[in-house]
Image: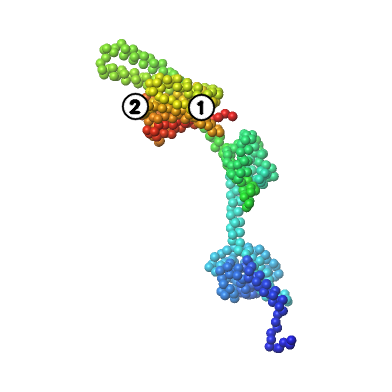
Amino acid sequence: MQRTLEEPPQPPKLFQHHFDLFADLIETSQDAIIALSPEFKILTFNHAAELMFDYSRDEIIGQSAFNLVPLGRGGELQEKLKRVHAGEAIAHYETLRMKKDGTRFNVSIRISAIRNNHDELTGFSWILRDVTDKKAAESLIQKLSSVVEQTADMVMITDKQGIVEYINPAFSTITGYKKEEVIGFTSKILKSGKHSSSFYKQMWETLLAGQPFQATMANKKKDGTLFFCEKTITPLFREDKTISHFVSTDKDITDKKLAEEQAQAELRRSNTQLEEFASIASHDLQEPLRTITCYLQLFASKNKLLLDSDSKDYLRFALTSSQRLQKLIQDLLIYSKVGMGKISSSEFKSLDAVNEALDLLRESISRNKVRVKIGPLPVIKADKNRMVQVFQNLISNAIKYKSAKPPTIQITAHSDKKEWTFKISDNGIGIPRESNSKIFKLFQRLHRKTEIEGTGIGLAICQKIVEQAGGKIWVESKPDKGSEFYFTVPKTP
Protein backbone atom coordinates (compact mmCIF):
# COMPACT_ATOMS: atom_id res chain seq x y z
CA MET A 1 0.00 0.00 0.00
CA GLN A 2 1.34 3.38 -0.89
CA ARG A 3 1.22 6.08 1.79
CA THR A 4 0.40 9.63 0.78
CA LEU A 5 2.47 12.51 1.98
CA GLU A 6 -0.45 13.80 4.10
CA GLU A 7 -0.65 10.58 6.18
CA PRO A 8 1.50 10.66 9.34
CA PRO A 9 3.59 7.58 10.03
CA GLN A 10 1.81 5.05 12.27
CA PRO A 11 3.72 3.31 15.11
CA PRO A 12 3.85 -0.45 14.84
CA LYS A 13 1.09 -2.19 16.79
CA LEU A 14 3.56 -4.01 19.06
CA PHE A 15 5.20 -0.74 19.99
CA GLN A 16 1.82 0.78 20.82
CA HIS A 17 0.95 -2.25 22.92
CA HIS A 18 4.15 -1.96 24.94
CA PHE A 19 3.64 1.75 25.31
CA ASP A 20 0.12 1.22 26.70
CA LEU A 21 1.37 -1.44 29.11
CA PHE A 22 4.06 0.90 30.36
CA ALA A 23 1.56 3.74 30.84
CA ASP A 24 -0.80 1.41 32.74
CA LEU A 25 2.08 0.23 34.91
CA ILE A 26 2.94 3.80 35.88
CA GLU A 27 -0.70 4.73 36.49
CA THR A 28 -1.49 1.74 38.70
CA SER A 29 1.74 1.84 40.69
CA GLN A 30 1.37 2.15 44.47
CA ASP A 31 4.32 4.54 44.44
CA ALA A 32 4.03 8.14 43.26
CA ILE A 33 5.81 8.55 39.89
CA ILE A 34 6.55 12.05 38.61
CA ALA A 35 8.46 13.14 35.48
CA LEU A 36 10.24 16.53 35.46
CA SER A 37 11.68 18.60 32.66
CA PRO A 38 15.34 19.68 32.83
CA GLU A 39 13.95 22.97 34.18
CA PHE A 40 12.19 21.09 37.02
CA LYS A 41 8.69 21.54 35.56
CA ILE A 42 6.24 18.71 36.28
CA LEU A 43 5.45 16.77 33.09
CA THR A 44 3.58 13.69 34.37
CA PHE A 45 1.81 12.96 37.65
CA ASN A 46 0.35 9.48 38.24
CA HIS A 47 -2.69 8.60 40.32
CA ALA A 48 -0.61 7.64 43.40
CA ALA A 49 1.05 11.08 43.22
CA GLU A 50 -2.39 12.73 43.21
CA LEU A 51 -3.32 10.82 46.38
CA MET A 52 0.03 11.52 48.01
CA PHE A 53 0.14 15.29 47.41
CA ASP A 54 -3.62 16.03 47.17
CA TYR A 55 -3.08 17.79 43.82
CA SER A 56 -4.97 16.86 40.64
CA ARG A 57 -3.03 16.51 37.39
CA ASP A 58 -4.71 19.61 35.98
CA GLU A 59 -3.52 21.66 38.94
CA ILE A 60 0.09 20.56 39.06
CA ILE A 61 1.30 19.61 35.57
CA GLY A 62 3.38 22.45 34.17
CA GLN A 63 4.10 23.81 37.66
CA SER A 64 7.52 23.85 39.32
CA ALA A 65 8.51 20.76 41.30
CA PHE A 66 9.48 23.12 44.10
CA ASN A 67 5.74 23.44 44.89
CA LEU A 68 6.08 19.95 46.38
CA VAL A 69 9.14 20.85 48.46
CA PRO A 70 8.92 22.47 51.93
CA LEU A 71 10.63 25.80 52.51
CA GLY A 72 14.27 25.34 53.35
CA ARG A 73 14.56 22.13 51.34
CA GLY A 74 14.93 23.65 47.85
CA GLY A 75 18.72 23.77 47.93
CA GLU A 76 18.80 20.13 48.98
CA LEU A 77 16.67 19.20 45.94
CA GLN A 78 18.85 21.18 43.52
CA GLU A 79 21.99 19.51 44.90
CA LYS A 80 20.47 16.03 44.42
CA LEU A 81 19.36 16.81 40.86
CA LYS A 82 22.83 18.11 39.94
CA ARG A 83 24.35 14.86 41.20
CA VAL A 84 21.88 12.84 39.11
CA HIS A 85 22.64 15.04 36.08
CA ALA A 86 26.31 14.22 36.61
CA GLY A 87 25.52 10.53 36.33
CA GLU A 88 25.02 9.50 39.97
CA ALA A 89 22.08 7.25 40.89
CA ILE A 90 20.16 8.24 44.01
CA ALA A 91 17.99 5.54 45.54
CA HIS A 92 16.08 5.45 48.85
CA TYR A 93 16.83 9.06 49.67
CA GLU A 94 14.64 9.98 52.66
CA THR A 95 13.46 13.56 53.02
CA LEU A 96 10.35 15.68 53.50
CA ARG A 97 7.79 16.66 50.90
CA MET A 98 4.73 18.90 51.15
CA LYS A 99 1.05 18.37 50.35
CA LYS A 100 -1.20 20.97 48.75
CA ASP A 101 -2.35 22.20 52.20
CA GLY A 102 1.24 22.60 53.44
CA THR A 103 1.33 19.39 55.47
CA ARG A 104 4.81 17.88 55.57
CA PHE A 105 5.34 14.15 55.36
CA ASN A 106 8.25 11.73 55.11
CA VAL A 107 9.12 10.12 51.78
CA SER A 108 11.74 7.82 50.33
CA ILE A 109 12.72 8.97 46.79
CA ARG A 110 14.51 7.34 43.92
CA ILE A 111 15.78 10.01 41.48
CA SER A 112 16.89 9.06 37.97
CA ALA A 113 17.95 11.01 34.91
CA ILE A 114 15.96 10.61 31.65
CA ARG A 115 18.16 10.70 28.54
CA ASN A 116 17.53 10.33 24.80
CA ASN A 117 19.35 8.14 22.32
CA HIS A 118 22.12 10.70 22.11
CA ASP A 119 22.63 10.61 25.92
CA GLU A 120 21.24 14.10 26.21
CA LEU A 121 19.33 14.96 29.41
CA THR A 122 15.63 15.31 28.70
CA GLY A 123 14.34 15.28 32.27
CA PHE A 124 14.20 13.56 35.64
CA SER A 125 12.01 10.87 37.17
CA TRP A 126 10.92 10.73 40.80
CA ILE A 127 9.61 7.56 42.37
CA LEU A 128 8.30 8.40 45.84
CA ARG A 129 7.00 6.25 48.68
CA ASP A 130 5.31 7.68 51.78
CA VAL A 131 7.34 6.46 54.78
CA THR A 132 5.58 8.55 57.45
CA ASP A 133 4.31 5.47 59.29
CA LYS A 134 7.69 3.79 58.92
CA LYS A 135 9.48 6.84 60.33
CA ALA A 136 6.99 7.05 63.21
CA ALA A 137 7.53 3.35 63.96
CA GLU A 138 11.30 3.82 63.81
CA SER A 139 11.05 6.82 66.14
CA LEU A 140 8.91 4.84 68.58
CA ILE A 141 11.34 1.91 68.44
CA GLN A 142 14.22 4.31 69.10
CA LYS A 143 12.40 5.78 72.09
CA LEU A 144 11.56 2.34 73.48
CA SER A 145 15.14 1.25 72.93
CA SER A 146 16.37 4.32 74.82
CA VAL A 147 13.96 3.59 77.67
CA VAL A 148 15.19 0.00 77.93
CA GLU A 149 18.84 1.00 77.63
CA GLN A 150 18.60 3.85 80.16
CA THR A 151 16.19 2.43 82.75
CA ALA A 152 17.54 1.63 86.20
CA ASP A 153 15.73 -1.73 86.19
CA MET A 154 17.27 -4.90 84.80
CA VAL A 155 15.85 -6.01 81.42
CA MET A 156 16.61 -9.38 79.87
CA ILE A 157 15.17 -11.00 76.72
CA THR A 158 15.36 -14.76 76.20
CA ASP A 159 14.09 -17.15 73.59
CA LYS A 160 11.41 -19.70 74.44
CA GLN A 161 14.04 -22.11 75.83
CA GLY A 162 15.39 -19.43 78.20
CA ILE A 163 18.59 -18.66 76.24
CA VAL A 164 19.53 -15.01 76.79
CA GLU A 165 19.52 -12.84 73.66
CA TYR A 166 19.71 -9.36 75.21
CA ILE A 167 20.53 -7.62 78.50
CA ASN A 168 20.46 -3.88 79.15
CA PRO A 169 23.25 -1.89 80.88
CA ALA A 170 21.41 -1.96 84.23
CA PHE A 171 21.65 -5.76 84.21
CA SER A 172 25.44 -5.54 84.05
CA THR A 173 25.57 -2.74 86.63
CA ILE A 174 23.49 -4.68 89.18
CA THR A 175 24.77 -8.23 88.63
CA GLY A 176 28.36 -7.55 87.61
CA TYR A 177 28.05 -9.76 84.51
CA LYS A 178 29.14 -8.42 81.10
CA LYS A 179 27.06 -9.04 77.96
CA GLU A 180 29.44 -11.64 76.60
CA GLU A 181 29.18 -13.59 79.88
CA VAL A 182 25.39 -13.79 79.66
CA ILE A 183 24.20 -13.72 76.04
CA GLY A 184 23.92 -17.22 74.64
CA PHE A 185 23.54 -18.76 78.10
CA THR A 186 20.54 -19.29 80.39
CA SER A 187 19.75 -17.05 83.36
CA LYS A 188 20.62 -19.90 85.75
CA ILE A 189 23.83 -18.00 86.54
CA LEU A 190 21.67 -15.78 88.78
CA LYS A 191 20.20 -18.65 90.80
CA SER A 192 20.70 -18.16 94.53
CA GLY A 193 19.44 -21.52 95.78
CA LYS A 194 16.79 -19.70 97.82
CA HIS A 195 13.86 -20.93 95.71
CA SER A 196 12.54 -24.47 95.49
CA SER A 197 12.16 -26.54 92.34
CA SER A 198 8.38 -26.23 92.73
CA PHE A 199 8.78 -22.42 92.53
CA TYR A 200 10.49 -22.69 89.14
CA LYS A 201 8.02 -25.36 88.00
CA GLN A 202 5.13 -22.99 88.71
CA MET A 203 6.99 -20.17 86.95
CA TRP A 204 7.43 -22.15 83.73
CA GLU A 205 3.88 -23.52 83.81
CA THR A 206 2.57 -19.94 84.09
CA LEU A 207 4.78 -18.61 81.28
CA LEU A 208 4.17 -21.47 78.85
CA ALA A 209 0.45 -21.00 79.41
CA GLY A 210 0.95 -17.49 77.99
CA GLN A 211 0.51 -15.68 81.30
CA PRO A 212 2.89 -13.14 82.91
CA PHE A 213 4.74 -14.30 86.04
CA GLN A 214 5.46 -12.03 89.01
CA ALA A 215 7.41 -12.76 92.19
CA THR A 216 9.86 -11.34 94.69
CA MET A 217 13.12 -13.22 94.17
CA ALA A 218 16.52 -13.57 95.77
CA ASN A 219 19.23 -13.73 93.10
CA LYS A 220 23.01 -13.97 93.15
CA LYS A 221 25.49 -11.51 91.64
CA LYS A 222 28.71 -12.48 89.89
CA ASP A 223 30.64 -11.95 93.15
CA GLY A 224 28.23 -14.22 95.05
CA THR A 225 26.38 -11.40 96.83
CA LEU A 226 22.64 -11.88 97.20
CA PHE A 227 20.25 -9.23 95.92
CA PHE A 228 16.47 -9.05 95.99
CA CYS A 229 14.25 -7.99 93.12
CA GLU A 230 10.63 -7.71 92.11
CA LYS A 231 10.56 -9.79 88.93
CA THR A 232 8.02 -9.70 86.10
CA ILE A 233 8.39 -12.06 83.12
CA THR A 234 6.11 -11.48 80.13
CA PRO A 235 5.71 -13.77 77.09
CA LEU A 236 6.04 -12.24 73.60
CA PHE A 237 3.83 -13.68 70.85
CA ARG A 238 4.16 -14.16 67.11
CA GLU A 239 1.31 -13.32 64.75
CA ASP A 240 0.06 -16.90 65.03
CA LYS A 241 -0.22 -16.46 68.84
CA THR A 242 2.69 -18.82 69.61
CA ILE A 243 5.33 -17.71 72.11
CA SER A 244 8.60 -16.49 70.60
CA HIS A 245 10.44 -14.84 73.51
CA PHE A 246 10.22 -13.84 77.16
CA VAL A 247 10.99 -10.36 78.54
CA SER A 248 12.13 -10.23 82.16
CA THR A 249 12.23 -6.96 84.12
CA ASP A 250 13.71 -6.84 87.61
CA LYS A 251 13.48 -3.95 90.06
CA ASP A 252 16.29 -4.08 92.62
CA ILE A 253 14.68 -3.86 96.08
CA THR A 254 17.68 -5.03 98.11
CA ASP A 255 17.92 -1.85 100.20
CA LYS A 256 14.16 -1.84 100.79
CA LYS A 257 14.19 -5.54 101.72
CA LEU A 258 17.09 -5.15 104.16
CA ALA A 259 15.43 -2.08 105.72
CA GLU A 260 12.18 -4.03 106.15
CA GLU A 261 14.00 -6.98 107.73
CA GLN A 262 15.85 -4.62 110.06
CA ALA A 263 12.59 -2.88 111.00
CA GLN A 264 10.89 -6.24 111.61
CA ALA A 265 13.79 -7.39 113.78
CA GLU A 266 13.60 -4.14 115.74
CA LEU A 267 9.83 -4.54 116.10
CA ARG A 268 10.25 -8.12 117.33
CA ARG A 269 12.85 -6.97 119.85
CA SER A 270 10.60 -4.13 121.06
CA ASN A 271 7.60 -6.46 121.29
CA THR A 272 9.63 -9.00 123.25
CA GLN A 273 10.78 -6.33 125.68
CA LEU A 274 7.22 -5.02 126.00
CA GLU A 275 5.85 -8.50 126.59
CA GLU A 276 8.50 -9.19 129.20
CA PHE A 277 7.70 -5.89 130.91
CA ALA A 278 3.95 -6.60 130.81
CA SER A 279 4.52 -10.08 132.24
CA ILE A 280 6.71 -8.83 135.07
CA ALA A 281 4.46 -5.87 135.81
CA SER A 282 1.32 -8.01 135.76
CA HIS A 283 2.91 -10.63 138.00
CA ASP A 284 4.17 -8.03 140.48
CA LEU A 285 0.81 -6.24 140.57
CA GLN A 286 -1.17 -9.36 141.42
CA GLU A 287 0.22 -9.84 144.94
CA PRO A 288 -0.57 -6.35 146.31
CA LEU A 289 -3.95 -6.45 144.55
CA ARG A 290 -4.78 -9.79 146.20
CA THR A 291 -3.84 -8.25 149.55
CA ILE A 292 -6.11 -5.23 148.93
CA THR A 293 -9.00 -7.46 147.90
CA CYS A 294 -8.49 -9.76 150.88
CA TYR A 295 -8.49 -6.90 153.41
CA LEU A 296 -11.54 -5.33 151.81
CA GLN A 297 -13.38 -8.63 152.15
CA LEU A 298 -12.26 -9.02 155.79
CA PHE A 299 -13.33 -5.45 156.54
CA ALA A 300 -16.75 -6.08 154.99
CA SER A 301 -17.18 -9.34 156.89
CA LYS A 302 -16.29 -7.92 160.33
CA ASN A 303 -18.13 -4.64 160.01
CA LYS A 304 -21.23 -5.52 157.99
CA LEU A 305 -23.49 -4.80 160.98
CA LEU A 306 -21.80 -1.47 161.68
CA LEU A 307 -21.89 -0.10 158.13
CA ASP A 308 -24.72 2.04 156.88
CA SER A 309 -26.19 1.67 153.39
CA ASP A 310 -23.87 4.21 151.72
CA SER A 311 -20.77 2.66 153.31
CA LYS A 312 -21.78 -0.80 152.10
CA ASP A 313 -22.20 0.59 148.56
CA TYR A 314 -18.76 2.22 148.71
CA LEU A 315 -17.23 -1.02 149.89
CA ARG A 316 -19.01 -3.03 147.17
CA PHE A 317 -17.75 -0.62 144.49
CA ALA A 318 -14.20 -0.97 145.82
CA LEU A 319 -14.38 -4.79 145.82
CA THR A 320 -15.89 -4.88 142.30
CA SER A 321 -13.17 -2.58 140.97
CA SER A 322 -10.38 -4.59 142.58
CA GLN A 323 -11.79 -7.84 141.15
CA ARG A 324 -12.13 -6.26 137.70
CA LEU A 325 -8.54 -5.05 137.91
CA GLN A 326 -7.42 -8.50 138.99
CA LYS A 327 -9.13 -10.02 135.93
CA LEU A 328 -7.56 -7.37 133.69
CA ILE A 329 -4.09 -8.14 135.04
CA GLN A 330 -4.64 -11.87 134.57
CA ASP A 331 -5.71 -11.34 130.93
CA LEU A 332 -2.79 -9.00 130.32
CA LEU A 333 -0.44 -11.63 131.73
CA ILE A 334 -1.94 -14.26 129.37
CA TYR A 335 -1.58 -11.86 126.40
CA SER A 336 2.08 -11.15 127.18
CA LYS A 337 2.87 -14.85 127.58
CA VAL A 338 1.49 -15.65 124.12
CA GLY A 339 4.54 -13.99 122.55
CA MET A 340 7.01 -15.57 124.96
CA GLY A 341 8.40 -19.05 125.19
CA LYS A 342 8.60 -21.78 122.60
CA ILE A 343 5.50 -22.79 120.65
CA SER A 344 4.82 -26.48 121.12
CA SER A 345 3.40 -27.74 117.83
CA SER A 346 1.95 -31.24 117.53
CA GLU A 347 -0.88 -33.05 115.77
CA PHE A 348 -4.15 -33.37 117.71
CA LYS A 349 -7.87 -33.62 117.17
CA SER A 350 -9.29 -30.11 117.15
CA LEU A 351 -12.47 -31.61 118.67
CA ASP A 352 -10.40 -32.39 121.80
CA ALA A 353 -9.40 -28.72 122.08
CA VAL A 354 -13.05 -27.67 121.69
CA ASN A 355 -14.17 -30.11 124.41
CA GLU A 356 -11.49 -28.86 126.81
CA ALA A 357 -12.67 -25.29 126.24
CA LEU A 358 -16.28 -26.35 126.85
CA ASP A 359 -15.26 -28.05 130.11
CA LEU A 360 -13.64 -24.83 131.30
CA LEU A 361 -16.86 -22.94 130.47
CA ARG A 362 -19.23 -25.62 131.81
CA GLU A 363 -20.71 -23.46 134.58
CA SER A 364 -21.33 -20.48 132.26
CA ILE A 365 -22.86 -22.73 129.59
CA SER A 366 -25.18 -24.35 132.12
CA ARG A 367 -26.18 -21.08 133.76
CA ASN A 368 -27.03 -19.44 130.43
CA LYS A 369 -28.65 -22.59 129.00
CA VAL A 370 -26.43 -22.49 125.91
CA ARG A 371 -26.94 -25.02 123.15
CA VAL A 372 -23.66 -25.99 121.43
CA LYS A 373 -23.62 -27.74 118.04
CA ILE A 374 -20.34 -29.21 116.79
CA GLY A 375 -19.76 -30.35 113.21
CA PRO A 376 -16.99 -32.66 111.96
CA LEU A 377 -13.63 -31.18 113.00
CA PRO A 378 -10.18 -32.05 111.57
CA VAL A 379 -6.85 -33.16 112.96
CA ILE A 380 -4.53 -30.13 112.93
CA LYS A 381 -0.94 -29.37 113.82
CA ALA A 382 -0.55 -26.47 116.24
CA ASP A 383 -0.01 -25.63 119.91
CA LYS A 384 -2.94 -27.41 121.53
CA ASN A 385 -3.04 -25.35 124.75
CA ARG A 386 -3.14 -22.14 122.76
CA MET A 387 -5.89 -23.48 120.49
CA VAL A 388 -7.91 -24.33 123.62
CA GLN A 389 -7.45 -20.67 124.65
CA VAL A 390 -8.76 -19.49 121.24
CA PHE A 391 -11.87 -21.71 121.38
CA GLN A 392 -12.47 -20.76 125.02
CA ASN A 393 -12.31 -17.02 124.33
CA LEU A 394 -14.52 -17.20 121.23
CA ILE A 395 -17.15 -19.39 122.91
CA SER A 396 -17.05 -17.21 126.03
CA ASN A 397 -17.59 -14.15 123.84
CA ALA A 398 -20.58 -15.77 122.16
CA ILE A 399 -22.14 -16.45 125.57
CA LYS A 400 -21.31 -13.00 126.92
CA TYR A 401 -22.93 -11.19 123.97
CA LYS A 402 -26.08 -13.34 123.81
CA SER A 403 -29.43 -11.86 122.85
CA ALA A 404 -32.86 -12.43 124.35
CA LYS A 405 -33.19 -15.61 122.27
CA PRO A 406 -31.99 -18.94 123.73
CA PRO A 407 -28.25 -18.87 122.92
CA THR A 408 -27.01 -21.29 120.25
CA ILE A 409 -23.36 -21.71 119.29
CA GLN A 410 -22.24 -23.72 116.27
CA ILE A 411 -18.63 -24.83 115.66
CA THR A 412 -17.66 -26.09 112.19
CA ALA A 413 -14.64 -26.32 109.87
CA HIS A 414 -13.96 -26.53 106.17
CA SER A 415 -10.84 -27.11 104.12
CA ASP A 416 -9.00 -25.87 101.05
CA LYS A 417 -5.60 -26.84 99.65
CA LYS A 418 -3.52 -24.83 102.08
CA GLU A 419 -5.48 -24.41 105.33
CA TRP A 420 -8.37 -25.30 107.61
CA THR A 421 -10.94 -22.59 108.34
CA PHE A 422 -12.87 -22.82 111.63
CA LYS A 423 -16.15 -20.99 112.18
CA ILE A 424 -17.75 -20.21 115.55
CA SER A 425 -21.19 -18.74 114.93
CA ASP A 426 -23.84 -17.53 117.38
CA ASN A 427 -27.29 -15.96 117.41
CA GLY A 428 -26.31 -13.11 119.73
CA ILE A 429 -26.62 -9.34 119.55
CA GLY A 430 -24.11 -9.01 116.69
CA ILE A 431 -21.54 -6.34 115.94
CA PRO A 432 -21.77 -3.19 113.76
CA ARG A 433 -19.81 -3.68 110.53
CA GLU A 434 -17.59 -0.64 111.16
CA SER A 435 -16.41 -2.26 114.42
CA ASN A 436 -15.42 -5.63 112.89
CA SER A 437 -11.70 -4.82 112.80
CA LYS A 438 -11.53 -2.77 116.02
CA ILE A 439 -12.62 -5.58 118.33
CA PHE A 440 -9.29 -7.43 117.89
CA LYS A 441 -7.30 -4.52 119.33
CA LEU A 442 -6.23 -4.40 122.98
CA PHE A 443 -8.77 -2.87 125.40
CA GLN A 444 -11.33 -2.25 122.63
CA ARG A 445 -14.85 -2.64 123.96
CA LEU A 446 -18.18 -1.95 122.25
CA HIS A 447 -20.21 -1.80 125.49
CA ARG A 448 -19.76 -0.16 128.89
CA LYS A 449 -18.41 -2.34 131.71
CA THR A 450 -21.69 -1.87 133.54
CA GLU A 451 -23.58 -3.42 130.60
CA ILE A 452 -21.37 -6.42 129.74
CA GLU A 453 -18.35 -7.59 131.72
CA GLY A 454 -14.99 -7.91 130.03
CA THR A 455 -11.47 -6.53 129.80
CA GLY A 456 -11.16 -6.01 126.04
CA ILE A 457 -8.19 -8.39 125.80
CA GLY A 458 -9.74 -11.78 124.92
CA LEU A 459 -10.02 -11.27 121.15
CA ALA A 460 -6.56 -9.66 121.02
CA ILE A 461 -5.23 -12.86 122.60
CA CYS A 462 -7.03 -14.94 119.95
CA GLN A 463 -5.56 -12.84 117.14
CA LYS A 464 -2.05 -13.11 118.53
CA ILE A 465 -2.25 -16.91 118.91
CA VAL A 466 -3.76 -17.44 115.44
CA GLU A 467 -1.27 -15.17 113.66
CA GLN A 468 1.69 -16.75 115.43
CA ALA A 469 0.43 -20.11 114.14
CA GLY A 470 0.49 -18.70 110.58
CA GLY A 471 -3.25 -18.10 110.24
CA LYS A 472 -5.65 -15.18 110.30
CA ILE A 473 -8.82 -14.32 112.18
CA TRP A 474 -11.82 -12.17 111.30
CA VAL A 475 -15.50 -11.68 112.02
CA GLU A 476 -18.62 -11.28 109.89
CA SER A 477 -21.56 -9.84 111.77
CA LYS A 478 -24.55 -7.50 111.74
CA PRO A 479 -26.46 -6.06 114.72
CA ASP A 480 -29.22 -8.41 115.91
CA LYS A 481 -28.14 -11.04 113.37
CA GLY A 482 -25.50 -12.85 115.40
CA SER A 483 -21.78 -13.16 114.66
CA GLU A 484 -19.54 -15.57 112.76
CA PHE A 485 -15.92 -15.68 113.91
CA TYR A 486 -13.46 -17.33 111.51
CA PHE A 487 -9.84 -18.33 111.99
CA THR A 488 -7.48 -20.40 109.85
CA VAL A 489 -4.82 -22.98 110.66
CA PRO A 490 -2.28 -23.83 107.93
CA LYS A 491 -2.01 -27.42 106.77
CA THR A 492 1.36 -29.08 107.10
CA PRO A 493 2.88 -31.12 104.25
Which class describes the residues within 10 Å of circle 2: few (<14), some (14-19), or many (20+)?
Answer: few
- Measured along the vertical axis of the image, is residue 300 above or below residue 400? above
Image-based side of 181 in relation to 317, left or right: right
| Residue 302 percent location from the top left of the image | 31, 11
Q: Give me the disc on residue 451.
A: 2
Q: Quadrant of residue 89?
A: bottom right
Which residue is situated farthest in the left direction here? 308
For numbered disc 2, what is the local secondary structure?
loop
Q: Identify the residue at horizontal 64%, vertical 65% (top origin).
A: 109
The answer to whether one can see residue 409 in this image is yes
Q: Identify the residue at horizontal 59%, vertical 59% (top origin).
A: 133
Question: Quick one: 14 or 80, which is closer to the camera?
Answer: 14
Which image quarter holds the N terminus?
A: bottom right
Give the number of the mark in front: 1 or 2: 1
Q: Which residue is mark 1?
A: 377
Which image quarter holds the C terminus?
A: top right
Mark 1: amino acid: Leu
For numbered disc 1, what is the local secondary structure?
loop
Alpha carbon distance from label 1 to label 2? 34 Å
Mark 2: amino acid: Glu
